[in-house]
Image (spheres, helix red, strand yellow):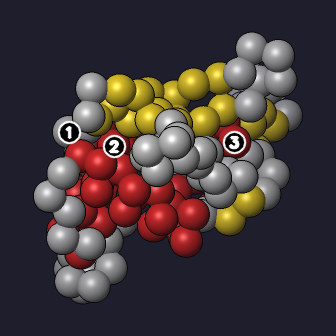
Amino acid sequence: MAKNVWIGNSRWPSGRNLGEFAKDVFRIENCKTDKEKALAFYEWLIRIMMRGPNFTVPDGFGTYSRSFDTMGMFASFGCFECTGWGWVGAEALQSAGLKARRVVGQNDGHTIYEVFYDDNWHAFDAFQAWYFLNDSKEVA
């Protein structure tokens, strides 16, 4: 029996881990700058993830708790609410070498991720599929 076999192709990002997925997105989209990487990753993330409920996992007490396994959400389930999207985005980009963080709104708890490039933080909301452009047509 074969062990440690990985099947993939050059036209689809690796699902082995979050960092490899992001790096493959950069390769496929021929990204050179951190800005290009952030925008390409955002487009791939909203293309492959589905909006949906928090998945639950057995918590060992005969009940279920929300799953916060970002790789499981990303590779297996494909669904999550904004919290998971913020985690997946930030962790994948950090694992691929970009400076990224998850941001949670104070009043409503809505979660987005931000990427640092061109000397500023830039906000991406992959769950609601938006980002704002400023007057210079840059991601705000």
Label 1, label 3: how far apart the Cα atoms are: 23 Å
For the residues bearing labels 1 and 2, Cβ distance under 8 angstroms: no
**Percent x, y for residue 46?**
57, 63
In this rendering, the answer to whether 28 lies above or below 139 is below
Q: How many marks?
A: 3
Q: Give the left or right position of residue 124, taking residue 97 as reference.
A: right
Residue 47 visible in the shown view: yes
Label 2 is placed on what type of residue? Leu
Identify residue for label 1. 97
Identify residue for label 2. 93
Most extreme residue toward the top is 106
Q: Residues within 10 Å of mark 3 (few under 14, many from 20)?
A: many
Task: Depth check: give the residue in front, 42 or 52.
Answer: 42
Label 3 is placed on what type of residue? Cys
Which residue is painted at 74% across and 59% down in the image? 51
Identify residue for label 3. 82
**Percent x, y for residue 120?**
35, 26
Who comes first in sequence, dot 3 or dot 2?
Answer: 3
Task: Depth check: give the residue in front, 38 or 127.
Answer: 38
Which residue is painted at 81% across and 51% down in the image? 53
